[in-house]
Image (cartoon, helix red, strand yellow):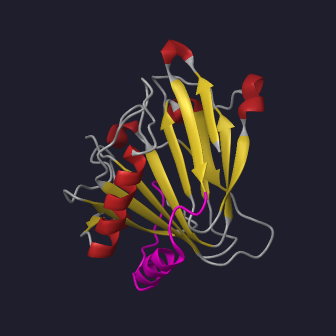
Amino acid sequence: MLKIIEEPNQEISLFMYIPNILSNNKIKEIHSWLKNKTFLSGQTSWNKSIYREQLWFQKDNKYFCNEWSKRYPRWESNPYESVLLNLQNDLQYRLSNLNLNYKSVQQPIINSCLINKYRDENDSIKPHRDTEITFGTNPTIIGLSIGSERKIKIKRLIYDAENTGVILYDNKKSHLNFDVSLENGSLFIMAGASQKYFSHEIPKEDYLCSERFSLTFREVVK
């Protein structure tokens, strides 16, 4: 699947879904490594529990966002291990061969990975944009799914450069909303102006889901 949406100022929003990006043996290797990691829970800045667990990795040991007023252990960087570094290098190579050579699409040098662990159907992540403070205004986001299939919801937003933290849905362009079922071993890419004009979320499900890991690779630019 490839969606390219023309945006103002000669930008585009790009979404790409690639199933079966890795071999079964590679998926098993990564899954085994993930199962042996200790993930962190935590709270939001307004003292609400988050409905997932996570680990953050950054090659220069950077905190997720140094401009945030509060610091939490789950956003402290962990040291890279060979399994993760080899996977990151592999995805960097694959990304370079996708020829996403559009004017507004970042060609990232991947230097971070956020791993979210969704324990069951009750774990979720709310609608959000990826923060431009850490990743820039037009980040390329490479998401690898390992484990149970889950749905990601993409919804059109109104963009206000002065209030990028505000989620305001663009009901006049709701026809651009879509869902993708993220299968085991699949890759989902968001790029260009996607973080200006769209939110993404993993909602809770009303059917049984087993464990899922999402590994999100990006370039930290600040």
Rendered residue at 45%/54% (across/down): 45
Which residue of the protein is positioned furthest toward the left in this rendering? Answer: 60
The answer to whether residue 111 is left or right of residue 25 is left
Q: In this view, does 195 lie to the left or right of 80?
A: right
- Decide if residue 166 is in sight here: no
Taking the magenta stretch, the answer to whether it contains residue 95 is no
Answer whether residue 23 is magenta in the image: yes
- Residue 34: name its quadrant: bottom left
Vertical order, 194 against 186 (above or below): above
Residue at image position (67%, 38%) is 155
Q: What stretch is highlighted in magenta?
A: 19-45
**How far across and how far down the image is residue 11, in percent?**
50, 21
Nearest the camera: 19 or 151? 19
Q: In this view, does 179 lie above or below 7?
A: below
Query: Which residue is painted at 30% across and 46% down in the image?
Result: 220
Q: Looking at the picture, how far across and down is residue 2, in whole percent?
A: 62, 40
Q: Give the farthest residue toward the right.
A: 206
The x and y percentages for residue 221 are: 27, 40
Residue at image point 58% right, 66% down: 51
